[in-house]
Image: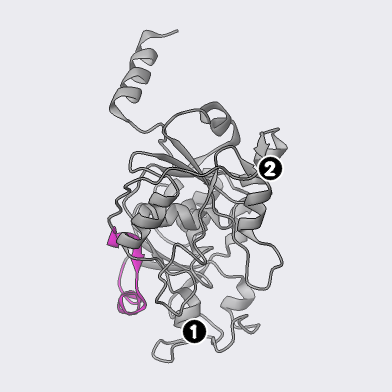
Amino acid sequence: MDESIGCIFQVDKECNVSILNTDLVSVSWLQEHISEPTLKIIDASWFMPGSERSGVKEWEGERIDRAVFFDFDQVIKDQESELPHMLPSADYFSEQVGLLGVQNDSDIVVYDSVGMFASPRVWWMFKAMGHNNVAVLDGGLPAWLSAGGKTHKDAPSPVEKTDYKAELQSDWVISAKELEQKLESENCTVLDARPNNRFLAQVLEPRKGVRSGHMPGAKNLPFLELLVDGKLKSKQELSDLFDALAPVQDHYYFTCGSGVTACILALAASLTGRYKLSVYDGSWTEWGSDERYPVVK
C-alpha cells in the first residue's frame, strides 16, 4: 500500500475532510463507503400528484441501510406558502434536518426509488442551505438493487437529533420577480425541464389555473433527455446537450413544473463544470398562474 494514501486517509478521519469530491456517486462507490461514520444516506422519493405511490411508505417497506426519509413535499418545506414544496427558511430546515440525525460535517448521499427523479431536489436543497458535502446516487434504489445491494425491510430505527445549522446561499435560488428582471440580460440562460409539448403549449398544464407556454427567451431541455435507464448520461453527453444551448460561463436558471425536475438539470450542469446555477423554486406552477408574468406560446 502506498504510504501517501494511508496518510491522506488518516487526515480524512482526524480533520473531517469530506469523503465526497463529486455531486454524483455510483453504486460501487456507495458499496465501498457505506460503513464510513460520516456518511448519511437519505431517501428522497417523491411522486407526481395523482400517483398511487407513497415515498414514505416505500421507504418504510424497504430502504438502503440506515437511510432516513426526507419529505420535501409535506414536511421540510415552507409551510406558509400555497405553492408546492417551496424551500423553507434556514431555521426550519435546520430543525427538521436535525431530526433526521444529519450533522453539518455529514457526507450525504441522496437517492430515490425511481432512479433519478426526486433525489436532485434534496441535493439542491442542501446546497442552497450551505451543505456542500452532498451527492446523488446515480440510478437510485433500482441501480442499488440491480447490483445486489442490501436493503432493510424491518421498521426504521429511531435516530438521535442533532444541532444542525443551515445558512441560506442565495445564489442557488431565485424568485419570480428576480428572474423576470434577468430574462433579457446577457449571459443569462433559462432552461425549462418540462416536456416539449408543455413548453410549446401543445397540451394543457396538469395543474388547474396554470397557463400553458413558457417564459420569454427560455429554452427547453426536457429532463428525460439527460437520462438513460434511470441514470444520468455521461459527462461528455451532458456537456454536448448544454453546449448546444448556451456557453459554459453563462448564469443558468432552471425551471420546471414545480421545482423538482429543474434540479436534475442543475445537477447535470454542475457535472459539466457550470458553476453559476440557480433554481427558480416556484417554477411554472407560480409563473403560469400569475398574470403579472409574461407567457409565450
| Numbered mark located on residue 209 in the image | none
Look at label 1 and name its amino acid: Gly
Cα separation, mark 1 vs mark 2, equals: 41 Å
Q: Quadrant of the C terminus?
A: bottom right
Q: Does residue 282 lie above or below 170 as drawn? A: below
Q: Position of residue 92 (x, y in %)?
A: 35, 62
Q: Does residue 94 lie above or below 17 as drawn? A: below
> What residue sits right under mark 2 in the picture?
153
Look at label 2 and name its amino acid: Lys
User: Which of the two discs, 1 and 2, labels the residue nearer the N terminus?
Assistant: 2
Q: Does residue 48 lie above or below 287 as drawn? A: above
- Element assignment for label 1: loop
Q: Position of residue 19 (x, y in %)?
A: 41, 31
> What residue sits right under mark 1 in the picture?
288
- Element assignment for label 2: loop
* Extreme residue toward the bottom, this view: 291
Q: Start and end of the magenta stretch?
A: 168-186
